[in-house]
Amino acid sequence: MTKGIILLSIVLLCISGCKYEPPASASSLTEESIALDFSRTFAVGGTYSSGFMDGALFTDGQKYSYPNLFAQSLSEIYERDIFIQADIESENGFNLEEGDNTKGKYKLVYESLSSMYVKRIPESGQQIGNWSGDDTDLNDYSFPGLKVHELLNSNGDTNNPYYNRVEGLNGSIIDQIVDKNPTMVILSLGNEDVLSFAFNGASGSDQPNLNTITEIDLIKPEDFQNIAVSVVNKIINETDAEIFIANVINPIETPFFNEIDWALELQEYDTSYIAAAGRFYEELNEQIAKHNFVENGSLPLSERRSIINFQLDAYCEVPTLICEIPFFIDRVNRARVIEDEYLDSDTLSDGTILPKIRQLTEGEKILYDNLPNLHRESLLSGIQPLNDSQVLTHDEIVVIENRIQSYNQILDGIAGSSNRIYLLDFHSVIEKLQANELNDDGVFYTNQFDELSFYSSDGYTINRRGQAFLANTLIEKLNEISESNVPKLKPNLFEGNKIEIGL
């Protein structure tokens, strides 16, 4: 980031801070003016709908979850709080990503005006404690980490620390909600599954057995459909509730997956670092050339292994057989090195096994939590390859995007199966964001680490302003189906990300 951009960001931050106000009031509404009954509103979901942001679940973040923002827009109608959350009762929360109970939510800091990347610095945190409230009052069943396959678990979600902090919960989550006779249920299904799979570098299975599925696996479409249909049918058949079901958003274009450059940056890595990495792979490149052109005749392009090329100027200073092959000249130089599980297991006639490593190509993603280990004193991504859990390759991105499409087709079909089910098209909100079309009164929001970002300081969850856009999607759907006039929220009036300069 240039000095000019940083200074402009500081100005924007001051402007946004001066404008910040609470959400708009719904005092002009009456119970008669709303065609539907929202007096017993419940939410079921994971990270996005819980208000988890900045790397932690904390009290202020919970208040700005889209289900709570929506409920607060209607609370004056019923002259009481209609949406009770299990308040985490913590100012900074507990940062699970850091894995240290002394660390809480992130703040964003540039070390200096010349820094290329912003750092996520955790503030002091607090361990997760039990909720002091009464479970019979609870409306919010959004728990960070909650997966689709856990919703019908008769023993509840016993491995989730956010679920376990609410004492007195018995039976499946859906059973508990049905027993409370809801009038409205907001469902967010599949987002947590996709986010967790991507967050772990797609290192889990995308075809897991439902009986042995783990936290980093991606549930199969047929299992997703069976559970989602069962959840919705139980609510439809055993209550009179209206169901608002959110579709799945694509996390791939968040800052967490999109900020770190796929090639070694010349601003960070000098020529001596890059030259040393190139020398390290000389022997391997000779073995690859032998595999491609000697032992197997001349392999077709689709079957050749690519050399590791760190030439700065895209051609070889000293022409050799390897560099004269057009197939290799087209490879982008300085690209970071990764382990790729999808490469073939190639062995030379002398028994040498070619390692499954290659260089990244444009569009592949490095997870942002690797940033502290990516610098000129580190071998990582040069001599030491990034591993599968640290990167999303093109093949893995295709798996994720295809799975999102499958889930959303299923959810769209479910929404069309009953006149009591309505689809919340959050996916389209993210598409507008990625197309630079998401705005409030001419202020356009970004998918980057800045003050006008849709995403929070952890780089993958949704901040207060982003949550306001999601709440507006819910309000728009309510107004559409009931001919009501519930006022939409103003995202510009919500606090955005803050960025400091200097540690």
Image (cartoon, helix red, strand yellow):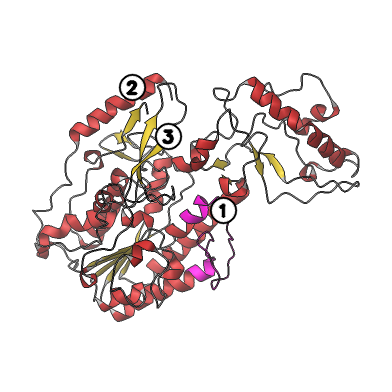
What amino acid is labelled 3 in the image? Lys
Q: Is residue 282 left or right of residue 426?
A: right
Quarter holding residue 273: top right
Residue at left offset 46%, top offset 30%: 117
What amino acid is labelled 2 in the image? Leu
- The reply to whether the magenta stretch includes residue 218 is yes
Determine which residue is flagged by label 3.
119
Cα separation, mark 3 vs mark 1, equals 24 Å
* Relative image position of residue 76 (x, y in whole percent): 11, 58
Q: Residues within 10 Å of mark 2 (few under 14, many from 20)?
A: few
* Relative image position of residue 141 (x, y in whole percent): 31, 65
What amino acid is labelled 1 in the image? Ala
Checking the image for residue 33, the label placed there is: none
Point out the tag, 3 or 1, that comes first from the N-terminus: 3
Determine which residue is flagged by label 1.
202
Determine which residue is flagged by label 2.
7
* Relative image position of residue 258 (x, y in whole percent): 49, 39
Residue at left offset 48%, top offset 55%: 196
Nearer the observer, 248 or 54: 54
